[in-house]
């Protein structure tokens, strides 16, 4: 099961990195948060694994609207780290 999780993390990370280096430079910078949502997802996947990483990223994306303040929104430290990478 750990190998499948590692494969999924690498698969998602590949597409995030392709986005960051090939697509993002051509778009206008619009991210409300620091670190950006793509970097946040990379970090959360590596720290918490696939399920928690994706869930944390989805909650962060729900905060991306004009009524939410701009802020430094780092990965929560109160969640136990279960990474084996």
Image (cartoon, grey):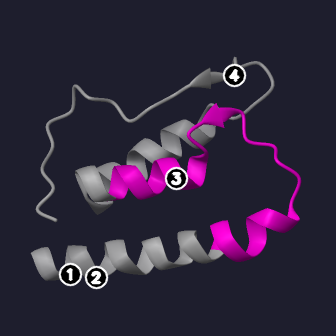
Residue position for label 1: 4
Residue 66 rendering spot, x and y as whole percentages: 81, 25
Confirm or deny contact between disc 4 and disc 1 (CB under 8 A).
no
Residue 8 rendering spot, x and y as whole percentages: 33, 77
Instruction: Mark 3 vs mark 1: give the one in front.
Output: 3
Q: Which mark is residue 59?
A: none
20 versus 62 height, above or below: below
Residue 46 rendering spot, x and y as whole percentages: 30, 58
Residue position for label 2: 7
Q: CA distance from mark 1 to mark 2?
A: 5 Å
Q: Secondary structure at mark 2?
A: helix
Q: Main secondary structure of the magenta part?
A: helix
Q: Secondary structure at mark 1?
A: helix
Q: Nearer the viewer, residue 35 or 41?
A: 35
Residue position for label 4: 70
Q: Nearer the viewer, residue 23 or 64?
A: 23
Residue 29 rendering spot, x and y as whole percentages: 82, 48
Confirm or deny contact between disc 3 and disc 1 (CB under 8 A).
no
Q: Which mark is residue 39?
A: 3
Number of numbered tags placed on the structure image: 4
Q: CA distance from mark 4 to mark 3?
A: 16 Å
Q: Residue at 26% x, 29% y: name it.
A: 77
Residue range highlighted in magenta:
19-45
Confirm or deny contact between disc 1 and disc 2 (CB under 8 A).
yes
Mark 4 or mark 3: whose residue is earlier in sequence: 3
Q: CA distance from mark 3 to mark 2?
A: 19 Å
Confirm or deny contact between disc 4 and disc 3 (CB under 8 A).
no
Instruction: Mark 3 vs mark 2: give the one in front.
Output: 3
Q: Quadrant of the C terminus?
A: bottom left
Q: CA distance from mark 3 to mark 1?
A: 22 Å
Q: Secondary structure at mark 3?
A: helix
Q: Residue at 21% x, 33% y: name it.
A: 79
């Amino acid at each position: 099961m750990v190998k499948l999780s590692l494969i999924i993390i690498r698969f998602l990370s590949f597409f995030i990195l392709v986005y960051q280096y090939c697509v993002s430079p051509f778009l206008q910078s619009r991210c409300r948060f620091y670190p950006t949502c793509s970097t946040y997802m990379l970090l959360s996947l590596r720290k918490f694994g696939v399920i928690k990483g994706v869930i944390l990223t989805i909650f962060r994306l729900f905060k991306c609207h004009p009524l939410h303040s701009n802020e430094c929104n780092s990965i929560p430290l109160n969640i136990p780290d279960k990474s084996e990478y």
